[in-house]
Image (cartoon, grey):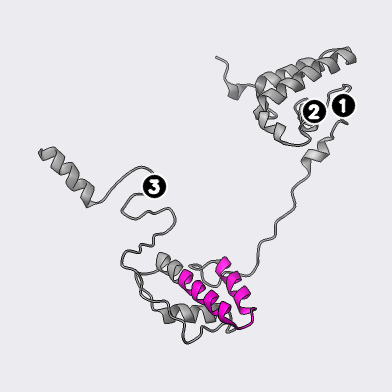
Amino acid sequence: MDYNTQREKLVLPEYGRHVQKMIEQVKAIEDKEKRSEQMRAVVQVMGILNPQIRELSDYKHKLWDHAQVIGGFELDIDAPYPAPTPQQFETRPDIITLPDKPVKAACYGRNIENIIDLIAAREDDEMKKEMIRSLALYMRQQYLIWNKDNVAEETIFADIERLSDGRLKVPADVHLGAISQSANYSRPGISVGGNNGAGFSGGNGNKKNRNWKRKK
């Protein structure tokens, strides 16, 4: 039995093993003109097997580059585009620097801190007051997800002042109002009602239904 794990590793899996074998056969052709002719046919097949690449403006150039990659950059052919070098595909991506500043409150996250900085830099006006109230409402929602069932608005207001290092103070006439009794806040990945999101249901209600069916 011939298993894929025992075969030669695919260079570009999106084109499959047959394309890789065809390119190896083209490399074995002694006549350069014949190699180039056969390679043009192989590239057409590659475009059919990988149709999404046609969405790129220079997809033909990409196909020829991919053919060179599959051929180990050893294809001696007359191609319509210059052959790429291995170094072009070995270039490491630029490192994305992460913020060194730690998050002050994990339940709110870094985005909340960024929003607070933007609001704090704004001049005092009616729009700023509405932005502060909207921010406080959202922070209360996040607080309830990760902490307890209720929280005083004073706690949220104090967190705003603390996270802004005193630059942002909630106006005295801003209030959040009562939390709706129908509001349910659950952590990401945990849905309300005991369903874990994987198609399994739980809870005493389901058990009662099963017992009722069994008795019936």
Q: Which residue is mark 3?
A: 197
Q: Nearer the viewer, residue 96 or 194?
A: 194
Residue at 57% of width from left, 77% of height from top?
A: 127
Depicted 24 relative to depicted 73: above or below:
above
Q: Are the residues tagged 1 and 2 within 8 Å (C-beta)?
A: yes
Q: Amino acid at mark 1?
A: Pro
Q: Is residue 107 above or below residue 32?
A: below
| Residue 54 locus on image (x, y percent) | 71, 31
Q: State the extent of the magenta-drawn residues as a range.
A: 110-139
Q: Taking the image as drawn, is residue 126 in sight?
A: yes
Q: Earlier in the sequence, mark 3 or mark 1?
A: 1
Q: Which residue is mark 2?
A: 64
Mark 3 to mark 1 CA distance (whole Å): 52 Å
Q: Position of residue 180 (x, y in %)?
A: 34, 68
Secondary element at image label 3: loop
Disc 3 residue type (three-letter)? Gly
Helix, strand, or loop for circle 1?
A: loop
Residue ID at (70%, 35%): 55
Amino acid found under the numbered disc labelled 2: Trp
Residue on which disc 1 sits = 80
- Left or right, residue 48 beside residue 81: left
Magenta span dominant secondary structure: helix
- As drawn, 52 above or below 119: above
Image quarter (top left, top right, bottom left or bottom right) of the N terminus: top right
Left or right: residue 36 versus residue 140 is: right
